[in-house]
Image (cartoon, rainbow, N blue to C red):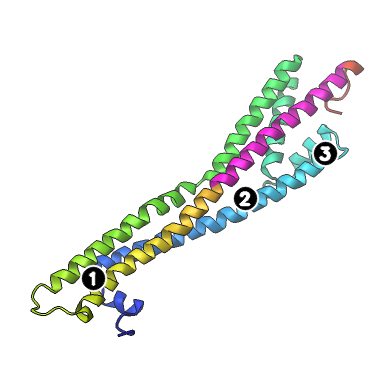
Amino acid sequence: MNNDLSIVTLMTHATWVVKAVVLILILMALSSWVIILRNLWRIKHQVNMNADFDQEFRSNLTLADLYANAMRNGKESKGGKERVFERGMREFQELKGKGVTSVAALLDGSRCAMRIQVQLELEKMESRLWLLGTVGSVSPYVGLLGTVWGIMHAFTGLGGLEQVTLAKVAPGIAEALVATAIALLTAIPAVIAYNRFVNQIDQVANHLDIAIEEYVNKLQYNLGGQAAAGGGKWLG
């Protein structure tokens, strides 16, 4: 009885519809776990890189030195905060090169450029996250389809029997319920991961918004110092 009702035996004797449903669920589970592992690494990498840049930003380096370092660093060695800072400083330098002297215009242009970069960073972090939500919401219904079909097939096969016992019903019902079990095992991790990633990305977004104001404040302080000194090297 145990051997007859093992998962391998049930799937071997299952109908082609149930087998197709289980295959689809396995593919959905594999794809969701690839995204989960990828996002775990990406968010952890972003947090570490942002922490490193926070430490560098609060050191004795000038904004000019920070911008030069950001320009030298490779793409993979820069976190979101450093890219946001670099985008804002690049816009500031371009406006200065065009002869813009208004402090308000310089700060607004730099802030706008940094906010655009924040949106790009968030879009990058949210890429393919929709697939986790889709797997979490759709897989139970896919499993339900296999379950309903398996139960229908089991009762259809019993229609011509005069005496129905539990031993004759159990394999067909168990085969149908395997699809539901696999669907739940697919959906639950996807939903948990999706909610966690959404929360973490919201936290990153808040940190980037705070960082923008911090960068703009330091830039404004430097511009004020230059004006009081009668000019001089930008961001020195």
- SS category of the residue bearing label 1: loop
The circle on residue 58 is 3
> Which corner quadrant of the image does residue 139 belong to?
bottom left
Relative vertical location of residue 54 with respect to residue 21 in this rendering, above or below: above
The circle on residue 15 is 1
| Residue 235: % across, % down | 83, 27
Check the picture and name the quadrant holding the C terminus.
top right
Q: Within 10 Å of the Cα at label 1, are there few (<14), some (14-19), or many (20+) other Cα atoms?
A: some
The residue lying at 59 percent from left, 55 percent from top is: 40
The amino acid at mark 2 is Ile
The magenta stretch spans residue 114: no
> Which corner quadrant of the image does residue 108 belong to?
top right
Q: Which residues are magenta?
A: 198-227
Disc nearer the start of the sequence (1/3): 1
How far separated are the C-alphas under marks 1 and 3? 65 Å
Check the picture and name the quadrant holding the N terminus.
bottom left
89 relative position to 193: left or right: right
The residue lying at 31 percent from left, 63 percent from top is: 21
Q: Within 10 Å of the Cα at label 2, are there few (<14), some (14-19), or many (20+) other Cα atoms?
A: some
Relative vertical location of residue 206 with respect to residue 227 in this rendering, above or below: below
